[in-house]
Image (spheres, rainbow, N blue to C red):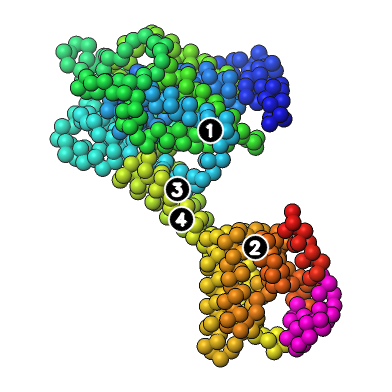
Amino acid sequence: MGAKARNCCSTQTVKNMLPICSWLPGYKLKYLAVDFLAGMTVGLTAITQGLAYGVVAGLPPVYGLYSAFMGGFIYIIFGTCKDITVGPTAILSMMMYSHLNGNPDYAVLMCFLSGCIIVVLGLLNLGVLVRYISVPVTTGFTLAAALNVGSGQISNLFGIQSNTNGFLDAWITFFSHIQETRRNDAILGCCTLIVLLLMRKLTALKCGHRQLLRYLALSRNVLVVFVGILLCYLLSRNSDEMIFRMTGAITPGLPPFRLPPFQTEDDLGQTVSFNGMISNLGAAVATIPLLSILESISIAKAFSKGKIVDASQEMIALGMCNVFSSFFSSMPITGSFTRSAINNASGVKTTLGGAFTGILVLMTLALLTSTFAYIPKATLAAIIIAAMIFMVEYDKIAEIWRAKKRDMVPFVATAASCVFWSLEYGMLVGIAVNALFILEKSTTPQFELTTQKHNGIELCLAELKGSVDYTAAEYLKSTTVARVTEEERTDSSIGLVIIKGDEIRSIDATVALNIISLRDELKLLRCELICWNWNVAAAGVVCRLQKQARAMFQFTKSFADLIEIVTANTGSTNSDQNASEGNGGAAGDSTRLDQIACDSSR
């Protein structure tokens, strides 16, 4: 503890906790222009996506902008990956939708709680928790989230009034009200979607203006929003009725700085306490922090370029971003893969690019909110659907299928549960299915049993490998006894079972007890048990349970030496003679057993 305390006060620890202290002293002026350009490019995308993700969460669009600026400032101080941009994402917005009921107080409280939980996990170095979520599970979850979010916008794409956001509910509502389709909205939405998909491919064109095409492709969301606003204004200025369904008035100005709400009011005007709010949020209190960590660390690893990612520090950075953002009426935020990819493609040099992104969002909130009232809902729906189409990891699904088809089981289980049940519980289903696979492997250890005959002795040779724990103990015992019993029925009596254990890494007390029990049961079947060349640590577990068990262990240089000892012991009735006839093998046995005894005393 003294060493830990001294380390906490060291310069290196401060640099680890505050990465800005490492890169800021060496910051070069030539980096500023690149970071500025990257930050502004990301900011343009963050504005349009923020408005869209506010709608996905079932909140006024302005809450998406409230969530898009503070994370960039805080990540500069605590973040380690220059490419990551922190803000609202489609998955978190979708997960919050079912818990908010249109009340932003729940979103802000969830942002604060999520940040606190993530910071605590980071300080406790619990970044390893992410390892328990496998690639098939995350891929299935991403597919389901894309289907849910994209399907939830299909009605808005065609101008149909709808408040549903689930996969089945969205399509049922769409086909039930398809006669309410608005022609202008449908044309605008479909054309916008086609343009977005085509503009994404601009970088593939071979011409002399590749840099210009690259920036056009990166700015495609901003361009279609600008065109949508312009069309709406020009076509509706001489009419009493808007030609498209609009986003509606957006609250102008910057969000107030205030504490997260620890109580709220329901639709009936009754006060809901903090405990009531937590109860209404339900499983989201646990799943949203976990998914935030997963998204952010996955992005950091994707852009690490061979560097080791400090998962715990990334968790602290993400948690602090959420905590500070909650004081500005933010929804839960995490790393965005789309905006991080744009940041990387823009050549950002440091995390300072996030400051320019935040400044652009703040300027938008201060000056342009009245303009955003003219954004057609069909345009925002097209932006969201286009993003979801490319969020699905098609290549990874194909790779899982080619590599190991069994891994498609947790993938399908996760995707189906998330689509037809809920995203939170679907993720848990996928983790549970994976856990069942791991449990199945642990109950069937690497254990190979063969029947052999040497020097007239019928024996079973069992090879046991790896770490063997209590879940495999009964399998080991029952399989061996069953083989000996089966051989007796065929009139070929087995008088010896040899368990080879040089590749055993470890065993636990339950396995040791079952080994001793196996020896006793084999004696009843007039069969002896020998544990041959066992790892000293594993043999020590058995010997500490029962000192007499040391007699089971034999250590020789070869299997032939072991057979010689067994044959000599079988043909002799004098126990002293048995010890002398063991020669080198017996000497090796004695030396190794002394080592076990020492290990036992330790």
Specify few, some or many for label 3: CA neighbours under 10 Å numbering under 14, 14-19, or 20 or more.
many
> Where residue 548 appears, x then y in whole percent?
69, 70
- Classify 244 as above or below 177: above
Evaluate if marks 4 and 1 touch, with contact meaning CB atoms under 8 Å apart.
no
Amino acid type for the residue under numbered disc 3: Ile
Residue at (54% x, 63% y) in the render: 472
What secondary structure predominates along the stretch shown in magenta?
Answer: helix
Residue drawn 56% across and 40% down?
A: 128
Q: Earlier in the sequence, mark 2 or mark 1?
A: 1
Instruction: Return the residue at label 1.
Output: 121
User: In the displayed structure, does residue 551 sit left or right of residue 240?
Assistant: right
Rendering quarter of residue 530: bottom right
Relative to 98, 202 lies left or right: right
Can you identify the residue that label 4 sits on?
436
Q: Mark 3 points at which residue?
A: 431
Q: Which residue is drawn at 71% across and 29% down?
A: 2
Magenta stretch bounds: 562-588
Kind of residue at disc 2: Leu
